[in-house]
Amino acid sequence: MKIDFENEFLDYILSRGYEYYINNKVSNISINDNIVSATVNGNYNYKVNLEIEDNIFFDGECSCPYFESSGYCKHMAAVLYYLNENKNCKTNKNFNLEDIVNKIEEKDLRKFLYTNLVNNSDWFNRFRVEFSNYFPKLSKENYRNKIYHAINKCCDRHGFIDYNNTSNYEHVMYEFIEEAEKLVDNEDYETAFTIITVILDSIPDTDIDDSNGSTGEIAEAVIEIIFDILDKVDDKNSAILRKIMDYVIKELKTAYLYNYGIDLNQILVYFIDNNLYLDDIKASLETALNIFKNKDYFYNREDYVENLIKIYELKGEKNQKIKILEKYSYDNNVFLKYIDELIKNNNSLMAIKALEERLKEKEYNSSIHANKLAEIYLKNNMMDKYTDILYKLFYEIDKYDIDVYRKIKKLYSNKDWQLEKNKIIENIKNDKYCDRYLNKIFIEEKMYDELYLNVCDYNMYDIKKYEKYLLPKYRDELLNIYKKSCLKDAEYANGRSNYRKIAEEVNHIIKIDNSKEVVKSILKEMNQKYFSNRPAMLDEFKNAIKNLKKYI
């Protein structure tokens, strides 16, 4: 039996994986229990590990960049195809196709081929891609016209691709992607990259119901092809690498594709890791960070700063890290990295000053900053300031947070804490609509009488959260509350979903010790009032409660 895996992979990944398999790129197969290890050879050798049990593919990993960023890759698919072929799988073929082709006259084969190329556009496109070196090169404008025309054919009269037509969109896009892949195989990187950039640029222009993630998959597919080109080009001064770099730099400065969920940062990281165009990238990152300085929600800023720091480090300027983080610390995520770096370099006083200033700004008056500041105060034994920031957190920033409450509690002796605890509870009671915060404190302090008094007016659904604390002392009271809650819900219930909810609540009561008499009284009243004229309610109770008859 063959390994069941194809539903776990995208179609274009399967297609590329099969090509790798038939081109004998899989080697060094090793099987140990249910783990299969292999190498997939190319310009780089990638290590693949697969978990397979009872002919089912469970999971796997690969050392390639695509797996790191996007998941199951062509190298994994290639190994799985190899395993299937080498398991002596049964086949329905009772002929050898190669023998048949060899027996046919060449002139007949040529006639058959030519006729189908003229009359079948799919044949012609595949032929043109396979033998692209024999055809004149198409310009970017040609490909743009072809790709946009193909997209438009998927649209309705309003220019929109609805959910039902997304599969058509995917199909035509993958045809161009396969063309680009074949061009890469033929080492025509320039034309392949032309197709890739047109496809990427088309995504923001495409008005589509993308709820199934079609455009994201297309983007991932073309980014993988860019990595294929990067892997295969040995000359690091190649013009195609410069073209790719220029395209990524343009995106750095506009974040146009990023706004549509297409992130080229992984390609930028490739160039940085390989020490390529560092000066150009550095200048572009600094320009982009300046352009986006006043943009409130630019989530890539942290990545830009990290890349900039990495470049400085590669250029031997590690001492620039704090300066760079400080320069761009107007971004909150970068600011927190700046604080961590100051602490790491034993500069707690500067970290404290920066955090204190940040907390004065209303928009940054957050629990993250306050907690970080509290952590530094405590570490430096600045107990008065530590106490002040904890109370500010508890009463203003992260209101009545139980973790902050526990930290405050540690500041007091047992005797002093009793007074402070009561003061805190009274302060919370004076804050309207904050009674539920009290419940956490009552639980923390094992004040279960107070907890009961605070929740006894809740409905059954809300009280259940506190049941384990209250049942030992207030079982009868809770059962009475639950009974009233169920009967009240039944009075206004309609529809199976509501009936089911009440039945499940009664079933919950059954599981409480010594609840049988209460359950009987609930079900007796429901039987008298509702079961005879609400058969759907009776059905739901039968489904939820085993041996319902013994209660009514």
Image (spheres, rainbow, N blue to C red):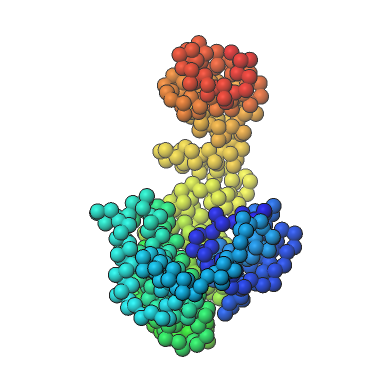
Q: Is residue 14 visible?
A: yes
The quadrant holding residue 345 is bottom right
Give how far across and how far down residue 404 sits, in percent. 53, 51
Up-down relation of residue 531 to residue 378 (above or below)? above
| Figure disc tally | 0
Quarter of the image that includes the C terminus: top right
The quadrant holding residue 480 is top right
Q: Is residue 381 visible?
A: no
- Judge from the rendering whether residue 28 lies leftward or rightward of residue 508; answer left or right: right
Choose between 168 and 161: the one closer to the eye.
Answer: 168
User: Residue at the spot x=48%, y=24% of the render?
Assistant: 499
User: Residue at the spot x=36%, y=80% of the render?
Assistant: 137
Choose between 13 and 453: the one closer to the eye.
Answer: 13
Up-down relation of residue 59 to residue 477 (above or below)? below
The quadrant holding residue 301 is bottom left
Residue lying furthest top: 528
User: Residue at the spot x=50%, y=15% of the render?
Assistant: 531
Residue lying furthest right: 33
Give how far across and how far down residue 243 sits, in percent. 39, 81
Give how far across and how far down residue 298 sits, in percent. 38, 66
Give how far across and how far down residue 445 sits, in percent. 60, 40
- Judge from the rendering whether residue 13 lies leftward or rightward of residue 546; answer left or right: left
User: Residue at the spot x=46%, y=51% of the render?
Assistant: 398
Choose between 334 and 326: the one closer to the eye.
Answer: 334
